[in-house]
């Protein structure tokens, strides 16, 4: 139920805007009050009068009129949830970059309330890397996503991009407004993420293709369950997850030092793709190419194994140490051997022969002393949420 809950509904431009009238009717029936902001694009698809009638309140559509009346800051402070439905590609892009050129974007920037977006757009626009990058940034900032659904569009076309149906949107809003259990409250979790950079000289380094998406998503999922999270991250383009302490490092040796400084921890999750080797003697000055000379060999030295170090018995060994195994063949066999060799408790094994590294989805095996579970292919955020839930169960 939504009794007494205040929703600020931002309606932007999409032919699906008519569906929010039904959503509003259902939300009010469930006890919520709905205040609407209509963008210029939204007004092309649904009238201010229809929204006013269905919300039972005046509709705000003009930054300057709102200033005289209630003010965008007061509007922003009003709700328990800001719901952008439908959220157009343009509004999502504006939110990503923090633009504030109309009432809706000013309120979105000024609010401290949780924000949920329900995108609606043509499948090609939804799948465009620009939109996907914007969604990833917004999600990493803690903005919730409702839909979109896959199905027929207004144009004779079908695919992902349909606005979530009103009843399903209501269920998603109800779930977001129901206080979640915080089973990891009081726990400290250490997470490593991303690649490491191992200098060869001041301008060159050894690296790998890790994006940090999976490790960062795990840090965010653990924080959402109430854990205090320290994320030790190699160089990545991912934004810092909300509510997480981030320590940025470059090399494996820096990463180990940052992990050891973060102890004690109840749980350690090593999702970083740590370079196995570094240049044995990184040059102080840029190495010069000399015409006609044989290229210099790079002697390698073994890096410390962070997972094995954290797994070793000692007064600060976390109760649960989780490693990752990225393999291109014999996934389970290699991952099981890795669990024994490193001394960790669980291994999350993933096949990286396809598009996993840098991709949005992952197919993993969870290997514990009790056996192996094969999880279906899912978004990295969903793998993270499932892993965080399993960790909470294990510590309970
Ligand atoms: O040995 P390999 O790199 O395949 O093992 C992968 C697991 O070990 C991952 O959990 C990774 O974070 C961790 N690891 C580490 N330090 C290293 C190498 C790997 O923590 N030097």
Image: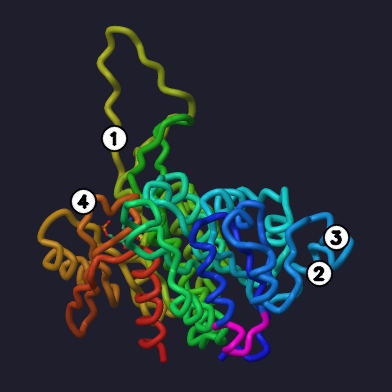
- Mark found first going from the N terminus, 1 or 4: 1
Distance, label 2 to label 3, CA atoms, is 9 Å
The x, y position of residue 299, in whole percent, is: 29, 35
Q: Please tell me the numbered disc located at residue 354.
A: 4
Residue 261 in sight from this viewpoint: no
Label 1, on which residue?
Answer: 299
Residue drawn at the location 56% of the way across and 67% of the way down: 244
Residue 84 as seen in the image, left or right of residue 166: right
Distance, label 1 to label 4, CA atoms, is 30 Å
The x, y position of residue 211, in whole percent, is: 39, 50
Task: Establish if 14 lies above or below 396.
Answer: above
- Mark found first going from the N terminus, 1 or 3: 3
Label 3, on which residue?
Answer: 67
Magenta residues span: 26-33
Q: Are the residues at dot 1 and dot 4 in contact (C-beta closer than 8 Å)?
A: no
| Ligand 1 under 8 Å from disc 2 Cβ | no
Can residue 396 be found in the magenta stretch? Answer: no
Label 3: state its secondary structure. Answer: helix
Distance, label 1 to label 2, CA atoms, is 63 Å
Residue 40 as seen in the image, left or right of residue 19: right
Residue 289, image quadrant = top left
Residue drawn at the location 72% of the way across and 61% of the way down: 107
Name the mark nearer the viewer: 1 or 2: 2
């Amino acid at each position: 139920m939504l009794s007494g809950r205040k929703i600020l509904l931002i309606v932007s431009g999409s032919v699906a805007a008519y569906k929010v009238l039904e959503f509003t009717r259902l939300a009010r029936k469930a006890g919520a009050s709905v205040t609407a902001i209509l963008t210029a694009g939204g007004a092309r698809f649904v009238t201010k009068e229809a929204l006013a009638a269905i919300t039972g309140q005046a509709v705000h559509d003009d930054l300057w009129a709102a200033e005289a009346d209630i003010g965008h800051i007061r509007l922003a402070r009003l709700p328990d949830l800001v719901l952008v439905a439908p959220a157009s590609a343009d509004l999502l892009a504006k939110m990503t970059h923090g633009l504030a050129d109309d009432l809706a974007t000013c309120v979105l920037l000024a609010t401290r309330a949780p924000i949920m977006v329900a995108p609606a757009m043509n499948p090609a626009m939804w799948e465009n890397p620009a939109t996907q990058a914007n969604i990833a940034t917004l999600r990493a900032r803690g903005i919730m996503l409702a839909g979109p659904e896959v199905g027929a569009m207004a144009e004779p076309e079908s695919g992902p991009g349909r606005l979530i149906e009103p009843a399903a949107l209501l269920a998603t809003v109800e779930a977001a407004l129901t206080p979640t259990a915080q089973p990891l409250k009081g726990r400290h979790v250490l997470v490593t993420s991303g690649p490491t950079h191992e200098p060869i000289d001041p301008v060159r380094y050894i690296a790998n293709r890790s994006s940090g998406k999976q490790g960062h998503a795990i840090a965010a999922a653990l924080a959402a369950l109430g854990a205090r999270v320290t994320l030790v991250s190699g160089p990545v383009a991912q934004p810092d997850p909300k509510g997480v302490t981030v320590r940025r490092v470059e090399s494996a040796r820096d990463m180990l030092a940052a992990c050891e400084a973060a102890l004690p921890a109840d749980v350690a999750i090593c999702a970083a793709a740590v370079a196995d080797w570094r240049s044995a003697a990184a040059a102080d000055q840029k190495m010069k190419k000399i015409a006609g000379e044989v290229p210099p060999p790079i002697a390698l030295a073994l890096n410390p194994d962070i997972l094995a170090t954290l797994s070793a018995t000692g007064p600060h060994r976390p109760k649960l140490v989780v490693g990752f195994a990225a393999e291109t063949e014999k996934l389970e066999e290699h991952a099981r051997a890795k669990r024994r060799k490193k001394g960790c408790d669980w291994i999350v094994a993933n096949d990286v022969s396809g598009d996993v590294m840098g991709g949005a989805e992952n197919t993993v095996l969870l290997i514990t002393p009790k056996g192996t579970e094969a999880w279906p292919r899912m978004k990295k955020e969903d793998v993270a949420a499932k892993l965080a839930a399993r960790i909470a169960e294990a510590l309970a």
